């Protein structure tokens, strides 16, 4: 009986990692001993795969753009036309001499006793 396998979506960030030709594998011990050196390599563009007992468990990849920018570039999201737009509530002139605050204060005072 064949079982269906679910294929993970490929995001722009994943495509960049998959396009990398050479991946360096490093064990957990070496990661602990030379983390700064490895991070410098990642900053320079290298992809480093972290292994535990020879089994890959994580991958260090350089961050090139924000995920938001990558999704815009890939057409996955459309940026707002006016991101600084704020909804302004219209002001209403009240009829009478009391403000809404005064009316509420009176109502609350009556409820307390």
Image (spheres, grey):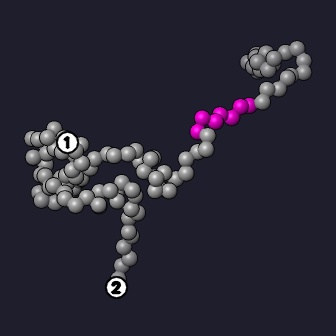
Give the mark toward the camera: 2 or 1.
Answer: 1
Which element is circle 2 on? loop
At 22% from the left edge and 52% from the top edge, which residue is drawn?
47
At 41% from the left edge and 48% from the top edge, which residue is drawn?
67
Q: Are marks 2 and 1 in contact (CB under 8 Å)?
A: no
Q: Which residues are magenta?
A: 83-89
Query: Where does label 1 land, which residue?
Result: 39
- Which residue occupies the extreme right position in the image? 96
At 90% from the left edge and 21% from the top edge, which residue is drawn?
95
Image-based side of 38 in relation to 89, left or right: left
Query: Where does label 2 land, which residue?
Result: 1
Nearest to N terminus: mark 2 or mark 1: 2
Work out whether 89 lies above or below 13.
above
At 82% from the left edge and 26% from the top edge, which residue is drawn?
92
Q: CA distance from mark 2 to mark 1?
A: 46 Å
Work out whether 34 lies above or below 23.
above
Q: Is residue 23 visible?
A: yes
Image-based side of 75 in relation to 106, left or right: left
Q: Main secondary structure of the magenta part?
A: loop
Q: Pinpoint residue 86: horizontal percent, then vertical percent.
A: 65, 34
Quadrant of the drawing holding the C terminus = top right
Q: Pinpoint residue 20: horizontal percent, then vertical percent.
A: 25, 58
Work out whether 10 lies above or below 65.
below
Which element is circle 1 on? helix
């Amino acid at each position: 009986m064949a079982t269906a396998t679910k294929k993970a979506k490929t995001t722009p960030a994943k495509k960049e990692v998959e396009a990398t030709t050479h991946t360096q594998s490093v064990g957990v011990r070496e990661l602990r001993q030379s983390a700064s050196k490895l991070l410098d390599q990642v900053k320079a563009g290298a992809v480093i795969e972290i292994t535990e007992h020879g089994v890959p468990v994580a991958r260090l990849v350089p961050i090139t753009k924000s995920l938001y920018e990558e999704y815009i570039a890939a057409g996955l999201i459309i940026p707002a036309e006016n991101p600084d737009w704020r909804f302004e509530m219209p002001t209403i002139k009240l009829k009478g001499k009391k403000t809404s605050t005064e009316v509420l204060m009176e109502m609350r005072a009556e409820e307390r006793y």
